[in-house]
Amino acid sequence: MNHGLLQKLLDYYQINYDQYLNLNKEVSLSTFSDGMHFEQIESAIKLVREIQKNNGKILIYGDYDADGIMGTSILVKMFQYTGYIVDFYLPNRYQDGYGINESKAQEFVKQNYDLIITVDNGVTAFKPIEILKENGIKVIILDHHQPEENLPIADYIIHPIISKFSDITTSGAFTAFMFSYAYLGYFDKYLSTLAAISLISDMMPLIGFNRDFLRAVFQEYKNGEFLQIDLLSDNEPFNENTIGMKIAPRINSVGRLIDNTSINEIVYYFTNNDKENIITYFNYLISLNEERKLLTKQANDSVNVDATQSAIISIMDIKEGLLGLVANSLMNVYQKPVIIFTLDSTKIVYKGSARSPEGFNIVEAFEKLKPYLIAYGGHSSAGGCSVSVDKFIDFQNGFLDIAKNKKITANHEDFIEISINDITEDNADLISSFAPFGECWKTPNLKISRIKTDSLMFSKNGEHILSQIGFNNRLVGFGFNKQKILLTPYVDMFGTIRKTFYKNNKNIEFLIKNVVSSTK
């Protein structure tokens, strides 16, 4: 073990050696939660069984993002295991909006449902749930979003905070997974993989039980066991990197682009066992995600940016599901608040998605501009809003004024200085012992200084760094143009060390995330 690098990593994460050992304690699907418990979950399960005993009609109401899709799939599959068929519905972003709404509630009343289970939504759906309850429909809410002071009049609300499971927030699909455990009486391995995807896709804090759960799932996963997951991961190791880079974007492309009820077909992908159907739908997901990437690139290339303004506010003719991707990309480049709007189907309302760097709270800004807004929500660094066309200029001016008076903190990351000689398998293993990485537990930021640019090798098109530094060691950086890199004689590189496998060949890579001109 490289004790020098280990100490640097301990300092980087501000932990001691005993805490490091605790990070690597043995965990399993039966021990990760350490006895923690959702209050009232048994009573909610009892209600479900009563409905089933009377052959009642049950609907799962999910959400259009990866967390909602995973949560819905977990519950549908859970019922399948017991031979009980339930209906499900994923709302369409463009027609239904987020969460269960009054129109859908009235529709479900007419369809004579006995029980509605919401997953990844519902904790603020006061009126829709009131409609359901007034018409004799039982309601169970499985959600993780921030509740208001008062709660909907559902029969049961299973929520990590409300149900006193933990002070650490977790995903809607994880909550659904714990519901499946209480219902089935055992931890189902396949359902646990779906919940694991949601923890990464929904950027849940990878501390405490969230981290231990991921570790347990990752160590028990075996390639070839679940076709749906193997396809989405391109048969790469099932871990946080593969989920974040491959699996989650492919799942989320459905909710971003599809504007009709065919969004619901993705639940069949995760809940049926027909190999031919699974492969057919996977190919569709790949094409949909490629379309999403192309549309996002086109939008990024075409957006009008006035870099002299205190914030970037732009109206674009793009799908609502792409707004956040464009806003996030621009925020990373310009390090200032960004809101990207598009005109909705009514032609009288702009829908916007916002991102901001440290030092600017989006929701606080929205609250100050509440008179101009139809609706808003989110948290300090990401949010969304709706504003009528006739109030847009007033809102825009108000937002720019707020941004002028806020000190935006440059996105500065601590780093660990290493040398090219440190790109070794032992160090890759050492770094991976701190994994999984994600929200609240970032991948360590390593720095290699003073690399001669004329010694670097690039891809044929000159757009990527692919520089061999040993038999199976290399520098890899995607999207770093050769001509721009060669403008300076020396560069500093920031990134991390990882192991990759391709056609049974193992490589130790320094994966580059940023390159800057060396100042030494």
Image: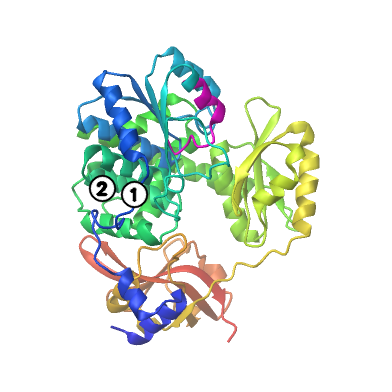
Q: Which residue is mark 1?
A: 37
Q: Is residue 425 above or below residue 95?
A: below
Mark 2 is on which residue type? Answer: Asp
Secondary element at image label 1 = loop
Query: In the visual, does 294 lie left or right of 262?
Result: right
Q: Nearer the viewer, residue 256 or 370?
A: 370
Mark 1 is on which residue type? Answer: His
Magenta stretch bounds: 119-132
In the rendered image, residue 29, in percent from the top left (x then y), is placed at 24, 54
Query: Do we see residue 281 in this rendering?
Result: no
Q: Is residue 56 above or below residue 494?
A: above
Residue 76, by quadrant, is: top left
Query: Do we see residue 445 in this rendering?
Result: yes
Image color mode: rainbow
N-terminal of the two: label 2 or label 1?
A: 1
Q: Is residue 260 above or below residue 175?
A: above
Residue 128: say if magenta: yes
Secondary element at image label 2 = helix
| Residue lying at 44% horizontally and 56% vertically, measured from the top left | 168
| Label 2 – label 1 distance at C-alpha | 31 Å
**Mark identifier at residue 230:** 2
